[in-house]
Image (cartoon, rainbow, N blue to C red):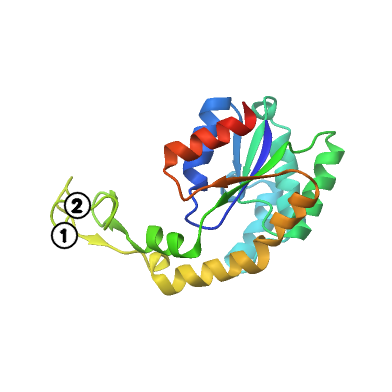
């Protein structure tokens, strides 16, 4: 299995990636994890990326692709891989295709977790975090017993800045502008597989399993 997981923030990509990794014994590759590991290990690529990150700039595609190429050649990718958070743009998808061609491999599918903007806003804006132990709640789907108070430690619950509705809608606007064109890109290549992510997490797991058998 060699696949790309697509979808807006709040579609459940992290949850599904964890399930797929365990079920199919494939490497879960996140660009964020790759960047942090290279920076932490002070690799040549990591040091180059850090100069951009420290100045608040986006890390260039060529650096990300180089890190990705190194990562895909590691032993745990022998049984397959799941790309989460990359590619984000069509230009990155082109670069990824070229890089995989050099490695004499390619992706089997791009799985799109489809969910409406309003569902994303409801899921993310309702999230609350304990300021003491970090426990996660949701005002509708998983509320605490006492409003604003953590059931585990009694700490206060707060809403992260990036979970506020205005920020979520800005993130969605960026997704639709930059990442959504990937849907057409992979559809034209016959690689796109659509999954209704409005359903429960267990249902989405079953739908993805049906794709790969």
- Residue 34 visible within the image: no
Whole-percent x, y for residue 148 in the image: 18, 60
Q: Is residue 161 above or below residue 32?
A: below
Task: Name the residue tied to disc 2.
Answer: 144
Which quarter of the rendering shows the N terminus? top right
The crowding category of the residue bearing disc 2, from other C-alpha atoms within 10 Å (few below 14, some 14 to 19, many at least 20), is: some
Q: Which mark is residue 147?
A: 1
- State the count of labels: 2
Q: Nearer the viewer, residue 151 or 35?
A: 151
Residue drawn at x 29%, y 58% is 128
Residue drawn at x 65%, y 69% is 177
Q: Residue 50 sits in which quadrant?
A: bottom right
Q: Is residue 1 above or below residue 190?
A: above
Say left or right for 120 vs 112.
left
Secondary structure at numbered mark 1: loop
- Residue 92 visible within the image: yes
For the residues labelled 2 and 1, say whether their Cβ atoms are less than 8 Å apart. Answer: yes
Whole-percent x, y for residue 85 in the image: 61, 51
Q: Nearer the viewer, residue 52 or 133?
A: 133
Whole-percent x, y for residue 199 in the image: 45, 46
Whole-percent x, y for residue 78 in the image: 70, 25
The residues bearing labels 2 and 1 have C-alpha atoms spaced at a distance of 6 Å
The crowding category of the residue bearing disc 1, from other C-alpha atoms within 10 Å (few below 14, some 14 to 19, many at least 20), is: few
Q: Is residue 108 above or below residue 159?
A: above
Residue drawn at x 71%, y 36% is 72
Secondary structure at numbered mark 2: loop
Q: Nearer the viewer, residue 184 or 8?
A: 184
Q: Residue 213 sits in which quadrant?
A: top right
């Amino acid at each position: 299995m060699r696949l790309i997981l697509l979808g807006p923030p709040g579609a459940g990509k992290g949850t599904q990636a964890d399930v797929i990794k365990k079920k199919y014994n494939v490497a879960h590759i996140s660009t964020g994890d790759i960047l942090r590991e290279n920076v932490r290990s002070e690799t040549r690529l990591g040091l180059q990326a850090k100069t951009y990150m420290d100045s608040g700039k986006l890390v260039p595609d060529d650096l990300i692709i180089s890190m990705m190429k190194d990562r895909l050649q590691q032993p745990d990718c022998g049984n397959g891989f799941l790309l989460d958070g990359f590619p984000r743009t069509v230009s990155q998808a082109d670069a990824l295709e070229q890089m995989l061609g050099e490695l004499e491999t390619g992706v089997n599918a791009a799985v799109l977790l489809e969910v409406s903007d309003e569902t994303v806003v409801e899921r993310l804006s309702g999230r609350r975090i304990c300021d003491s132990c970090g426990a996660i709640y949701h005002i509708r789907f998983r509320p605490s017993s006492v409003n604003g108070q953590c059931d585990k430690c009694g700490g206060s619950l707060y809403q992260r800045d990036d979970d506020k509705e205005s920020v979520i809608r800005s993130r969605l606007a960026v997704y639709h502008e930059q990442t959504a064109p990937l849907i057409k890109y992979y559809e034209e290549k016959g690689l796109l597989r659509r999954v209704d992510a409005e359903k429960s997490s267990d249902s989405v797991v079953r739908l993805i399993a049906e794709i790969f058998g």
